[in-house]
Image: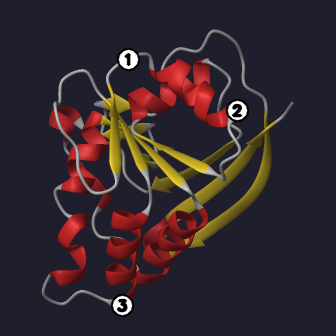
Amino acid sequence: MNVTVDGYVAAPGDDLGWSGPPSDEMFQWWLDQELAGTLSLYGRGLWEAMSSHWPTGDQQPGVTPAQAEFARNWRDTPKVVFSSTIDEVGWNTRLVTGDAVAEITRLKAGDGGPMRVGGATLAGAAVRAGLVDAYEIVTHPVLVGGGTPLFTALDSWVNLNLVETRTFPGGVVLTRYETRR
């Protein structure tokens, strides 16, 4: 998840302008993470943002090789979108309108590979249900003062082990944690 220093994934009005375009190095890191996953889980908001660009992202003017590969992988990777307000999805995607926690629990119990959860509301539900094994938090050096928080109220503490930190151009910092069991 991309987040501001003060803990928001979106500024007021769902403004994402603070994150700016990623550096080539940062974008390559995101691509590597996406290539390692076998299933992407999206909340409605992130799904709408991703599906508005990536289906044809490899056909845009000035696209880099990494962006073209990301677009192809995005189309090819199976996806599940959790929403009660949209009616239709495409691009190798299944829509779930019911209980997200129950569906993520079912998917996690299966024999598939790594899943990636995107979207603050969906991720928050997965965190509260104890379904998240690792956190990759990409902190951008900006304060926005309000908006959509990355973490909402939890029922109990979640203890984490620091696995990795890495600084990218522009002062963007990746922090990777695993859940301490």
What's the residue type where badge 2 is placed?
A: Ala
Q: State the residue lying farthest toward the top.
A: 155
Colour setup of the view? secondary structure
**In the image, residue 39 above or below residue 96:** below
Where is mark 1, residue-wise? 98
Where is mark 2, residue-wise? 109
Viewed as shown, does residue 138 lie left or right of 4? right
Can residue 153 be seen?
Answer: yes
* Percent coordinates x, y for residue 118 in the rendering: 43, 43
User: What residue is at 70 percent from the left and 32 percent from the top?
Assistant: 109
**Disc 3, SS:** helix
| Residue 46 in which image quadrant | top left
Viewed as shown, does residue 51 lie left or right of 140? left
**Disc 2, SS:** helix
Depth-wise, is mark 3 or mark 1 nearer the camera?
Answer: 1
Tell me the quadrant of the picture where the C terminus can be found: top right
- Frontmost residue, 2 versus 5: 2
What's the residue type where badge 3 is placed?
A: Pro
Where is mark 3, residue-wise? 65
| Residue 14 in which image quadrant | top left
